[in-house]
Amino acid sequence: MNLVNKPVEKNQIVDVEITSMTHDGLGVAKVGNFPIFIKNTLPGESVSVKVIAIKKNFAIGKVIDIYKQNELRIEPKCPIYKQCGGCNLQHLSYYGQLQIKTKNVKETLKRIGGIETTVHDCIGMEDSWKYRNKTQVPFGLYNDEVVAGFYRENTHDIINMNSCDIQDETADEIINYLKIVSKKYQLIPYNEENHSGNLRHVIVRKGYVTNEYMVTIVTKEKKLENKKEFINDLVNKFPMIKSVVQNINEKKTNTIMGNAQKVLYGENYIFDYIGDVKFAISSRSFYQVNPIQTNKLYDKVLEYANLTGNEIIIDAYCGIGTIGLYLSKKARSIYGVEIIPDAIRDAILNAKINSFTNAHYEIGKAEEVIKIWQKDNIKADIIIVDPPRKGCEKALLETIIEMKIPRVIYVSCDPATLARDLKILNENNYNINEVQPVDMFPHTMHVESIVLLKLKEADN
Ligand SMILES: C[S@@+](CC[C@H](N)C(=O)[O-])C[C@H]1O[C@@H](n2cnc3c(N)ncnc32)[C@H](O)[C@@H]1O
C-alpha cells in the first residue's frame, strides 16, 4: 500500500463509520484505504473522531461524538473501565461480544488460512462476571498510601482497585486486606523507577471446586518484613488460604515472577477439580483461568476425541496434564509433552493422585519429542495440540503429517496463528471438520477455539 499521501492529519477532526474491529477491541474506520483505529467504538457506529497520532500505515483516533450507536452498545459496568487496560469489550452487550468473537474466528480463518468451514456460535457463560480463578496485581505507593490494581493502559501507573467485576470476590478481599497489613508490618511496596521497596506483586489463585486459595507474594528481596506476624494475620483472617508462597524477583524487569521461591505457609499446592479429575496447582504452573468454561472446553475436546477406550493420545503442550488427564479414563494411553520441567512434575503428580497409570510424560519441545515417539513407532490415534499464542512450530506440524495421525484436535487462543497452522495441515491431507469457539475471557477480545481435523484417508 503506498501511503505517502496520508488522507488525514494529526489533530484533524473527521466523521467516519466504524466497519470492523481489531483483535485488541479497537473500532476500525477507513478514510479512503487508510485505517483509523478508535477505542470505545463498535462496528456500525457513525462517529466524529479526532486524529491523535499518525503512523506509517494507520492512524489513531479519539472519539468526540457518536452520532449513530450500535444497537448492542451498553454502559460499561466497571467504574474504571476507561482507564484500565484489563477489559476492552464492556461497552458491548455480552450477546454482542459472543457474536463478534464468532465472526472474528470465521473471518480470520478465511483471511489468513483461506479456510471456509463450519464455525459454530461461540459458547458463552450464563453469568459472564467474576469468572477468574487467578488475580494478579502490582503493588505500589501513591501519596503515601499502598495501592494495588491494574496498570493504566500502555503505562505502568497503578490504578488502585478495590474490586474487579471479572475477578473472584474473596481474592479482591485478600488483596484489600494485604494493602492494610503491608502498611501495618512495614512491608514497603516496590518502586519500579528507582528499584526500591520490597512488595512487588500479589497473585491469588483459587481452586474453584475446593475453595482452596493460594497467595503468592512477589518480593524484591529474600527477606520479608515481620514475616511470621504478617502471615499469621492473613491466614487467620482468611482460613480458606491453604498455601502462602514467597517468590523472589530481584531483577529490574517487567517479568512478574522470579526463579526462587519458598513456601511460607501450608503446602506448595492447592487442589482443584475439572469434572471428576483432581489437579494439584502450584504457584507458577499454567492453569486455565476460567474454570466454568474450561469444563465446557474440555468436554468439547472429549466429544471431538470420540473415544472407545483403545486410543493412544498425544497431548502436546500439555502444561500440568489437564486435557490429557481429563480424557485418560476413556483412552488406552496418553503421551504428554511440555517444555517446563515443573509443569511435567505436576502432570506426573496429577496422574498419580488420580491413580491414572496410562499417562506418560516427557520434558522437552513438542516438535522434538514427537520425533522420538515417531522413531519409537508410537501409533497415535489422536494428537491434541494446545500451543501458546504463537501457535505450533512448523516442525511439529510436519511430523504430524508424516506420522499420518488420524485425528488432530487443535485448541488455540489465537485465531491468526491457528489459521496459519490449519492452512498447512489442510494442504497436507487433513480435512478441517469443524471449529468451536469458546469464550474463556468475557469482556475482552480474546477467544479460544477448538478445531477437529481428520486425515483424509482416515475420513473415508
Ligand atoms: C496454552 S498452554 C496449554 C497448557 C495445557 N494444555 C492446559 O490446558 O492447561 C501452552 C503450554 O505450552 C508450553 N510450551 C510452550 N512452547 C512449547 C514447546 N515448544 N513444546 C512444548 N511445550 C511448550 C507452555 O509452557 C504452556 O504450558
Image (cartoon, rainbow, N blue to C red):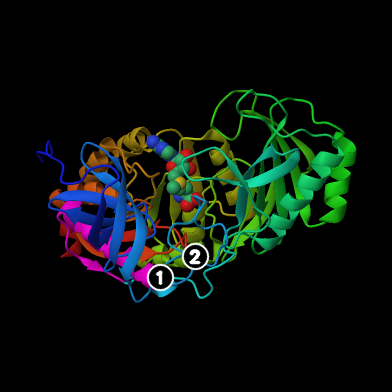
Q: Nearer the viewer, residue 171 or 196?
A: 196
Mark 1 — residue? 123
Rendered position, 200 above or below 333: above
Disc 1 and disc 2: Cα gap in Å? 8 Å
Mark 2 C-beta to ligand 1 under 8 Å: no
Tell me if 279 is positioned left or right of 86 in this view: right
Which residue is rendered at x = 20% and y = 40% of the image?
A: 57
- Mark 2 = which residue? 293
Ligand 1 is in which quadrant of the figure?
top left
| Residue 222 falls left or right of residue 76 | right
| Residue 47 locus on image (x, y percent) | 29, 63
Q: Is residue 257 visible?
A: yes
Residue 23 x, y percent position in the rendering: 33, 53
The quarter in which the C terminus is drawn is bottom left
Q: Residues within 10 Å of mark 1 (few under 14, many from 20)?
A: some
- The magenta stretch is 96-120
Q: Based on the displayed image, in which of its 4 quarters is residue 391 positioned?
A: top left
